[in-house]
Image (tube, rainbow, N blue to C red):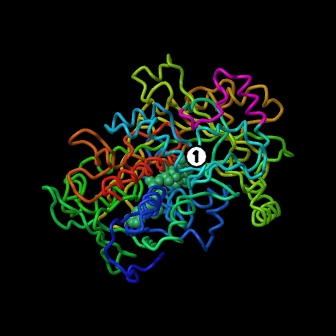
Amino acid sequence: ALYNDPSKLNSTTYDFIVVGAGTAGNVIAARLTENPSVRVLVVEAGVSDTGYRSQDLQIPLFGPRASINSPFDWNYTTTPQKGLNNRVLTYARGYVLGGSSSTNYLTWTRGSRDDYDRLAKVIGDNSYSWNNMIKYFKKSEQWVHPRDGRDDSDEYSPDVHGTNGPILLSTGGVRTVMDTRVLATTEQLSEEFPFNLDANSGDILGVGWLQSTMGDGSRSSSSTAYLRPALSSRKNLDVLIQTRATKLIKTGTLKGVPRFGRLEVGQTTSSRRFTFTARKEIVLSAGAVGSPQILMLSGIGDAPDLSKLGIKSTVSLPDVGKNLIDRPVVGAQYIVPNDTATIDPITLGEDPAALTAALAEWTTNKTGLLTSAGSNFIGFFRVPDNSTILKKGDPTAGPGSSHYELAWQAAFASSTQTPPNSGRYISNIHVVTTPTSRGSITLNSSNPFTAPIIDPNFFDTNYDLSVMVYAIRSAQRFIKAQPWNGFVLAPYPDFAPVLADNSTDADVVTYIQKFTRTIHHPVGTAIASKEKGKGVVDSNLLVKKASGIRIVDASVFPISPSVHPVAGIYGVAELAADKIKKAYHI
Ligand SMILES: Cc1cc2nc3c(=O)[nH]c(=O)nc-3n(C[C@H](O)[C@H](O)[C@H](O)COP(=O)(O)OP(=O)(O)OC[C@H]3O[C@@H](n4cnc5c(N)ncnc54)[C@H](O)[C@@H]3O)c2cc1C
């Protein structure tokens, strides 16, 4: 059952306690409770995904309303970013059932064959290789057709997709004015921008139709797909919301290492604390910010750092919170004719009647503009092999992985620029997909209700900045191609100095530093490593030098597949659920 008060639960002992009802946590909870004799408690800091403002979570186009500055977000900020003129960035993380899968922008990209084969090598376990992961990717998803009923047979490749997994997946709910132009550009400039029928085939390079986590016109999250169906049909699952895990409690020693068999929780800084016991394991799925924070609050981390905050070290694992990998993104906007059917009238708030009509259509039929995830095309690319950018080496997993991403949107899309009041626009985003900068999550205080210090350390390396410059130049070649003639009228004024024929790399860098933000992909803060003395978890995702704690979420990825992360996190969570079932014969 679902609870919002820790004193109301009928039991204080479970087989497994999952911390965080987010993307990965809900996979673990749902898979383990398939066995009716296994009792699972999930503890989630955030709120329910039904009720107040829940349409913001359900409507695909409202992704941005669900995240930054919303009641469904932790509303974190970063440290001043020295690579970005010391700007402080908002740092969205889901604070709701489903975690960030309830608030993200729905893009579904698994990664390349090379990405997973390298992951398997670094972790030292072949189960992370592409050939093994493909069954978990398929297990997690179910292809459904776009909401507008069009024939999608030339938009994806059915044989690489699942047909009966929980997460619903489709291409965009409506066509946009950009679609034929994007497709024509892939034909005319096929060398640099080849068409790729399905980037989820393991071959990610080129431009293809964007696949999004939605079905029946609504977002599919780990809550709607995994948790809620389990909650409504199983008696062996309890979910406690609006309650924060404050620390793991050491309950003894097993095989010479400390065992953590109890979890402490609380609802506010000063509220009463409660504890729950896990007979088998505590699974930390609190995400790339939450999981290292809980470990450090429990004395698991870099001992000298923890002692500065008065936290006694229980397990020395200096890599906790280190190795934060996140991706920088910067957009560019272009002015298009005023009679173009972009979604600006809705997203810029210029035409309240258009929004009212779209909402009415969505409410009645779950169709229309609101079933768009914003974009219909995405592309992954490499800088040329002979580029000076790669002179110190290539950080990608291999020739099938990407250095950068471009995606296109039929609207003014930017959270770092002042939006115009009117007009029609298209946007292009540029992302460094294999960044080499590394940041960190550190504790600000021993108070679990104080936000940790988040430093993604964007553009710490010249490589990252050079790839972003290259990505912007590449996108300019795309938009200057013939299919855009007469449609793209001018760059949005902010971007004009970059698009000018005589612009220099310094102009591009100025633009990047002014407008880059995070694309919200943090991973790597509790990495899996096969090496002794390195990393935080082993290949089975069990915390090293301790007993009773496993971590299953974005934080265990030692490197990030060179795409958007959520499909990979679901895949690894499905794999981890099988590993747990096997370990306990359940
Ligand atoms: C705005 C935004 C847009 C994004 N867009 C995309 C996209 O389009 N495609 C894509 O692939 N990826 C996207 N991402 C990234 C992707 O959604 C995340 O990488 C992924 O969902 C993380 O999964 P997770 O299980 O690691 O963590 P989460 O899903 O974030 O789950 C962690 C959960 O733990 C809870 N928690 C944290 N601390 C505690 C605590 N102390 N006690 C109890 N509970 C706790 C949190 O509230 C949360 O529910 C986006 C992310 C955001 C925020």
- Asked if residue 302 can be seen in this view, the reply is yes
> In the image, is residue 12 above or below residue 366?
below
Magenta segment: 180-202
> In the image, is residue 553 above or below residue 388?
below
Is 496 positioned to the left or the right of 483 in the image?
left
329 in the magenta segment:
no
- The answer to which of 100 and 109 lies nearer the viewer is 109
Say what secondary structure mark 1 lies in.
Answer: loop
In percent of the image, x 24 and y 63: which residue is there?
A: 260
Picture coordinates of residue 61 (x, y %)?
68, 55
Crowd class of label 1 (few under 14; some 14 to 19; many from 20; radius 10 Å): many
Q: Is mark 1 within 8 Å of ligand 1?
A: no
In percent of the image, x 24 and y 50: which residue is there?
A: 544
> In the image, is residue 297 above or below residue 343?
below
Image quarter in which the C terminus is found: bottom left
Residue under label 1:
162
For the view shown, which residue lies furthest in the top direction?
386
For the view shown, which residue lies furthest in the right direction?
339
Please tell me how many numbered marks the rendered image carries: 1
> In the image, is residue 229 above or below residue 496?
below
Picture coordinates of residue 526 (x, y %)?
33, 49
Picture coordinates of residue 518 (x, y %)?
51, 47
Is 107 positioned to the left or the right of 427 in the image?
left
Is 283 positioned to the left or the right of 305 in the image?
right
For the view shown, which residue lies furthest in the left direction?
256
Picture coordinates of residue 41 (x, y %)?
39, 69
- Asked if residue 507 can be seen in this view, the reply is no
In percent of the image, x 78 and y 35: which residue is there?
A: 180
Amino acid at dot 1: Gly
